[in-house]
Amino acid sequence: MIEDDGYFGENIAATYDTSAADMFRPDVVDPAVALLAELAGDGPALELGIGTGRIALPLAGRGVPVHGIDMSRAMVDRLRAKPGGSAIDVTIGDFATARVEKTFSVAYLVFNTLMNLTTQDDQVDCFRNVAAHLAPGGCFVVEVMVPELRKLPAGQSAVPFHISDTRWAFDTYDLATQAMSSNYVTIADGRAEHWSIPFRYVWPAELDLMARLAGLRLRDRWENWTREPFTSESGKHVSVWEKPFD
């Protein structure tokens, strides 16, 4: 059920940091923060989908002023409760359209958050919104998966990614619409609870066209934050588009 906080209401925010604990490890966070700080230089950064501050807080700790946009007040409340969280300005709203009255050296979307926009039009609007916030020479950075369609045998639409005695998780794909969803089934006290969140998967070349429509151009694409080369075997990519000076 969609709440005012979107799909990340209080029930998700309360356990988000624990459920995504692997993404909070220093070996995951530090390379991302280092690259974003390098791109920000002396300027401010805009995080779309700032959530509980996994990237924003350590980036701010390096002296980069960070402003966030997020629909979920529950997630932002968790950010506010952390050391340094109250010093980060956050605009509550849809990051495809919400505006901040300033310009930024870098804007970024991490951990597949771009796919939370479930239509192509919304994803295009996001690129345009970011372009309007960037100063000339500024960069838009996106970390997102490469669709795992090669894991789908003929006639199958689901890809499991976690199976244990108490929790099952799987993605479903619709190849005709590029709609997908992540589904979680948790077993507790003999009862099963199901939670699902919709996404729209998107290809790197499609993102490049969205960037072009927004007046941005591809600057770099890597497999990860440590700048390993992006190849046909890469499961995700970190892409950087730049706003020209002219």
Image (cartoon, rainbow, N blue to C red):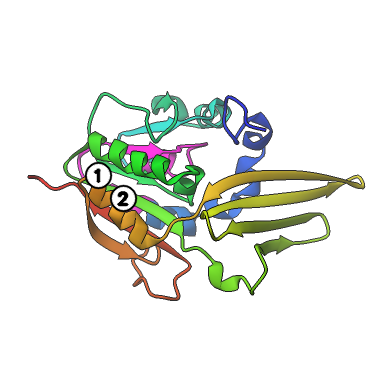
For the residues labelled 1 and 2, say whether their Cβ atoms are less than 8 Å apart.
yes
What segment is highlighted magenta in the picture?
33-60
Residue 242 sits above or below residue 43 on the image? below
Q: Amino acid at mark 1?
A: Ala
Q: Amino acid at mark 2?
A: Met
Q: Position of residue 171 (x, y in %)?
A: 64, 57
Instruction: Determine if residue 38 is in view.
Output: no
| Front-lying residue, 127 or 164 | 127
Secondary structure of the residue carrying numbered label 1: loop
Question: Which quarter of the image is occupied by the N terminus?
Answer: top right
Secondary structure of the residue carrying numbered label 2: helix
Question: Which quarter of the image is occupied by the C terminus?
Answer: top left
Write the residue at 62% across / 44% down. 197
- Decide: few, some or many residues near mark 1? Use Cα within 10 Å; few <14, some 14-19, many ≥20: some
Label placed on residue 106: none
- Decide: few, some or many residues near mark 2? Use Cα within 10 Å; few <14, some 14-19, many ≥20: many
Q: Which residue is mark 2?
A: 210
| Front-lying residue, 72 or 129 | 129
Q: Position of residue 45 (x, y in %)?
A: 30, 38
Q: Position of residue 155 (x, y in %)?
A: 67, 70
Q: Position of residue 186 (x, y in %)?
A: 79, 49
Q: CA distance from mark 1 to mark 2?
A: 6 Å
| Front-lying residue, 44 or 242 | 242
Instruction: Determine if residue 181 is in view.
Output: yes
Label placed on residue 214: 1
